[in-house]
Image (cartoon, rainbow, N blue to C red):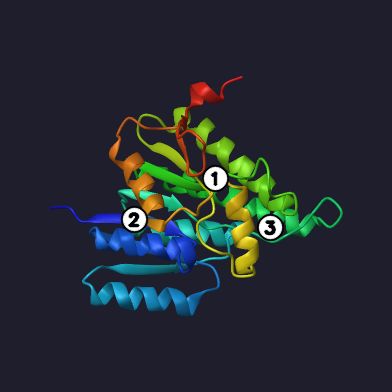
Amino acid sequence: MTQKRVFITGAAQRIGAALVHCLARDGYDVVLHYGTSQAQAQAIQTTLQTQGRMCTLIQGDLTKPEAIQAVIQAAIPLGPFDLMIHNASLFVPDTLATVTWQGLTDHLAVNALAPLMLIQGLADQTDHMVTLLDAHVHWHHQDFLSYTLGKHLLERLTVDLAPVLSPKTRINGIALGPTMKGVRESEAHFHTIIQKSHQKQASSVDAVYAALMDLHARSSASGEIINMDREAPRTMTPQAMAP
């Protein structure tokens, strides 16, 4: 039996780390990319190895083009992968009044350009890629201008690249609603965000993982986006997105 493998970016902490543990529980060996969280990544690696799972770490600063290419070159010999997940994200507040060229460039790099380059470099190494998006970039991130622009672009790439990659590789997205409190976020603010959401509750990691596995199991699904915070659950297809 061929061993299942997953490559996931930005997975040393938070949702990425939680998904890694879910995947390992379900029999996946993991190639885990991280940026600066070396200690956390090594702790996950140790835990997974004690569970009998392989876990290989790849470090890389996704704001730097040369580092992105180094991540690709490190990942290629570790494939092929059953699944590739772009979870890495930069989420730093800025507005029209405070946005800087460097801040915008860094957000676009991590949230859109890096996944594009990873898709280009690793499409032959997997038959399914999933991007983690944001269900709320259209309405409540006025104070996160650069982040929002990057996530908008990644959403567009996810839909537009589906016919380009077909039939060899599928690409889908999961637009996250409130799931985990941010590291700089108070409980009160997180509660406010939840109350502004359609569902009025945070998504569990298990629910996000179920959406991931649903997309992965449907071999015909490509260019679809599962929104974790909609009044009426539905998916977005390339046809639905067409003008």
Judge the density around disc 3: few (<14), some (14-19), many (≥20) Cα neighbours within 10 Å: many
Q: Is residue 127 visible?
A: no
Q: Considering depth in this image, is 177 or 118 the residue closer to the camera?
A: 177
The residues bearing labels 1 and 2 have C-alpha atoms spaced at a distance of 18 Å
Q: Secondary structure at mark 2?
A: strand
The residues bearing labels 2 and 3 have C-alpha atoms spaced at a distance of 26 Å
Q: Is residue 159 visible?
A: yes
Q: Position of residue 113 (x, y in %)?
A: 60, 48
Judge the density around disc 1: few (<14), some (14-19), many (≥20) Cα neighbours within 10 Å: some
Mark 2 touches mark 3? (CB < 8 Å): no
* Residue marked by disc 2: 6
Give the amino acid at mark 2: Val
| Number of numbered discs | 3
Examine the rendered structure and indicate whether residue 237 appears above or below residue 89. above
Q: Where on the picture, by quarter, is residue 218?
A: top left
Q: Residue at x 58, y 35 (%)?
A: 156
Q: Residue at x 41, y 44 (%)?
A: 129
Examine the rendered structure and indicate whether residue 51 appears above or below residue 136. below
Q: Residue at x 63, y 41 (%)?
A: 152
Q: Secondary structure at mark 3?
A: helix
* Residue marked by disc 3: 106
Q: Earlier in the sequence, mark 1 or mark 3?
A: 3
Q: Position of residue 138 (x, y in %)?
A: 66, 40
The residues bearing labels 1 and 3 have C-alpha atoms spaced at a distance of 14 Å
* Residue marked by disc 1: 116
Q: Considering depth in this image, is 120 or 235 the residue closer to the camera?
A: 235
Q: Earlier in the sequence, mark 1 or mark 2?
A: 2
Give the amino acid at mark 1: Leu
